[in-house]
Amino acid sequence: MAFDISATDIGRDLADPIREERIERVRAKIDQLGIKYIYYQYVTITGRVLGKAVPARHWERNARKGIQTWLGGITNVAADMHGNLYGFSANAGESLAMPDPETFVQLPWDKRMARVFCTLYHGLEDAHSPGMYFTADARGNLKRFEREFRDAHDGLHLRLGLEPEMAWLRKTEDGGIFPYEGITKTYAYHIGQFEGARDVWTQVMEYAEAMGLDMVQSDVEDAPGQIELNYSFDDALKTCDRLTTYRQIANEVARQHGLVACFMAKPFMGAPAMGCHHNCSLWRGDDYQVVRTVDGELPGMEEMFTYNRGGVNEFENKEDGWIPTELGRHALGGALKHIGALTALGASTVNSYRRFADVGLWAPIGANWGLQNRSCTIRISSPDRFEFRAVDSMVNPYLFCSALLKAIDEGIREKIDPGAPEDRNVVEVMQSGEDVKLIPMTLKEALDALAEDDIIREAMPGRLYELYDLMKRDEWQRFLKEVTNWDVERYLDCLP
């Protein structure tokens, strides 16, 4: 029997007439902008960007047939501490990276170049799932989970605003234990310090706006080199794509200036960490509007410059101040119930938990919610949204948002009550010895919480949970087997 591609996920997606219209619009953009090469990129389980570059003259063929890439790319083409490739053998098959035409945009630092995000599928020759979604692709999963959430809740959807803190570092002349220093000093909001980094952050802002990020406000913060540049909120997938774009822009600007664009959660103890707070609201109704961040011809697809600005915020209680609506409370209840497993995805590295251990420096530790209470992991930061704070700048946002949607979905379906908001400072309560529930304080604790959470693991279908757990348990074991500078300084000559 001949293989019927129309019965596969890839066949159904290719048959979408909107896709064909977008493919044609991309060709027009290629010709208008003089694009010579296109990066076909996808995002790995840990949030890295992989892919291939192809001459733009092959656009139509690649848009309809995809780009072949090894299945194990999704685990960073990396090996565990024993030298074994994570989850895939060297002889594993190929996946198909199918470009999402609506994400096509020119690279402002080299206008011959463009990029497009891809969704991953099993190859058509795959023995078990030919042409079906490759469910280890967290970005592809979020696309589907967004649609499912809307369908299950009469058009309700998550809109998201992120706070992508990061550190801009340069090498020190004398080296040392940590041979990097910030390009700014630890004076939060200090315009003089911000001015000293102006050449860097203005270049990031200009590149970002050329790629469709609606930049809204920025400042220098109180860790060495720490700068936060914010862009406007939008539907979850588009906001996550913009975070990935922002990271790539920062990396390019750092390369041009001989700096390091550091997204590591905690490069300096005794100073605040690099958080990536997720500000969440729940809406019904849509009104997609083009936000013109550049003059003249848009340097990419119109969808890259479009933001959802209409509808009703179902989280905000306009009659009762800062206490959310009933639906909003249920959403909080779902997130609170699954807070440990969510932390395993939001704080995804060994280093992430240095942020929580260094108490009193803005990071949350309480497994609770509160009104303007930064010691709580879930904070009502404004009457119209809640902020999930146990997320740092190493997060894979697609994976975390998929899990958050699953938690909120259960909260709404089961009408989970989050209880009363916490008004105490959780750090002070903990230090006093009083009883208070904390989020996981090590990566291992968080992974154990994830292992016990069936709902959050629904956001990690197929082999995704297995692969994430494999990579992160290996990271924990590597950490335990490492002799650090702390060990040497503490124990080298402590006896007799």
Image (cartoon, rainbow, N blue to C red):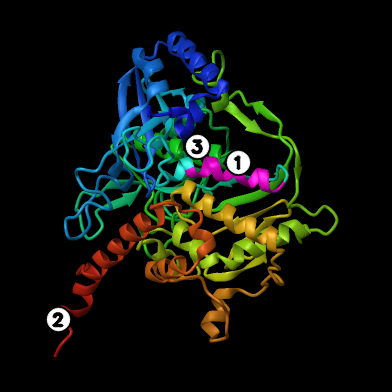
C-alpha distance separating marks 1 and 2: 60 Å
Q: Quadrant of residue 417?
A: bottom right
Q: Are marks 2 and 3 in contact (CB under 8 Å)?
A: no
Q: Secondary structure at mark 3?
A: helix
Q: Residue at point 46% right, 34% down? A: 8
Task: Name which residue type carries label 1.
Answer: Arg
Position of the N terminus by quadrant: top left
The answer to whether residue 21 is seen in the rendering is: yes
Q: Nearer the viewer, residue 201 or 173?
A: 201
Q: Position of residue 33 (x, y in %)?
A: 44, 12
Q: Tell me which numbered mark, 1 or 3, is placed earlier along the sequence.
A: 1
Q: Secondary structure at mark 2?
A: loop
Mark 1 Cα shell of 10 Å, populated few (<14), some (14-19), many (≥20): few
Q: Disc 1 or disc 3, which is closer to the eye?
A: 1
Q: Position of residue 48 (x, y in %)?
A: 35, 43
Q: Residue at point 44% right, 49% down? A: 396
Position of the C terminus by quadrant: bottom left
Task: Name which residue type carries label 2.
Answer: Asp
Tell me the magenta residue range. Answer: 141-153
**For residue 345, side relative to residue 113 (left or right):** right
Q: Tell me which numbered mark, 2 or 3, is placed earlier along the sequence.
A: 3
Mark 2 Cα shell of 10 Å, populated few (<14), some (14-19), many (≥20): few
Q: Residue at point 73% right, 52% down? A: 315
Which residue is the site of mark 1? 147
Q: Are marks 1 and 2 in contact (CB under 8 Å)?
A: no
Instruction: Determine if the magenta segment contains residue 145.
Output: yes
Which residue is the site of mark 3? 242
C-alpha distance separating marks 1 and 3: 19 Å
Q: Position of residue 349 (x, y in %)?
A: 37, 59
Which residue is the site of mark 2? 493
